[in-house]
Amino acid sequence: MEAKLDFDSIERRAKARRRAFNAFDYAMLTIWAVLVLFPFYWMLLTSIKSYGAYNAERIPQFITLAPTLDNYAFAFQKVSLGRYFLNTLLFTFCTTGLMMAVIIPAAFAFARLEFKGKQLVFTLFLSMMMIPNELVIITNFVTITGWNLRNTFTGMILPSVTSVFYIYLLKENFEQIPDELYRAAQVDGTTDFKYMISVMIPISMPTIVTITILKTIECWNSYIWPRLITDDKNYFLVSNGIQEIRENGFGRDNIPAMMAAVVAISAPLIVLFLVFRNKIMAGVSRGGLKG
């Protein structure tokens, strides 16, 4: 009887400790969530405040009783955000599509094909990840300028049509597919290209979708390279548009309109992530596992 009481007491103390640890974890997660989400809330809140109400605030207000969408209309009227959106969509679609057409066959070759010097080539390929981006940008700028491709979509797109990291991630995913499927396909007379299209790509679709989404986000947020390679407003992306607003537009005077422009530009990426967040997490975790 005493042993049972001691066991119950130990179990109660263990449960109490678990509850205390869980409460601590949730408290830390709540604080972290507030710190991360507050800038987005403040950006959205500022974007729906009128210019007069914002400037009249001596003490920042965390709510507004008179929201307005006039700042969004003002932002699109004062700066060619519509053109910048179309440019960014074109840049993102072309860059992502071309990159997928490059990295999928490359990952397949490293994962399934056998050729002399394969490991050495792959090791040298991975070593490119050690090169600082600044050096790559300088080399790309010299090359694109030498080809007279400045102020063109081709010049913006070409340096971004491949990625060592994404090839590595997809190669690791391809290698999880059993070799028996590949050998059976060879016995049936299936070509490597057909096997890649009909077997490996469908099985690895979660990772491919993840890479596509991540590349889309990367292209949408591109700033340094488009800013360097073009000074023609006809080729500006949304990131260039925000910089133009800050430097030469209304960004220094009309903060609510500036925040409205930032919200309008950020909203597509936020929606994209929320819709595909499960696929992104599943694809990344699957790519990091060895079967």
Image (tube, helix red, strand yellow):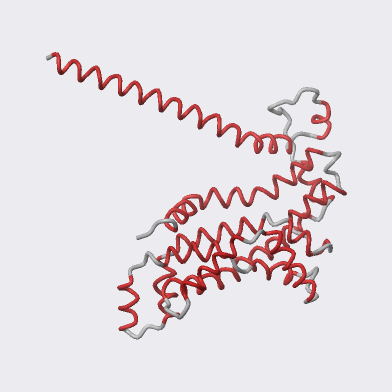
Residues 220 and 115: in front is: 115
Q: Position of residue 175 (x, y in %)?
A: 40, 67
Q: Is residue 147 left or right of residue 37?
A: right
Q: Is residue 161 above or below residue 33?
A: below
Which quarter of the picture shows residue 94?
A: bottom right
Residue 259 position, x and y percent, is 75, 41
| Left or right of residue 119, residue 16 in this image | left
The percent position of residue 268, horizontal first and vertical second, equals 63, 52
> Image check: 86 left or right of 26?
right
Relative depth, front residue between 4 and 116:
116
When asked about the image quadrant of residue 12, the answer is top left
Residue at the farthest left position: 1
Asked if 190 appears above or below 284 in the picture, the reply is: below
Where residue 40 appears, as percent x and y from the top left, is: 65, 38
- Using residue 102 as the reference point, say whether residue 48 is left or right of it: right
Residue furthest top as drawn: 2
* Residue at image point 78% right, 46% down: 73
Image position of 92 with respect to 249: above or below = below
Picture quadrant where residue 115 is located: bottom left
Q: How many marks?
A: 0
Q: Nearer the viewer, residue 144 or 155?
A: 144
Q: Which image quadrant: the N terminus?
A: top left
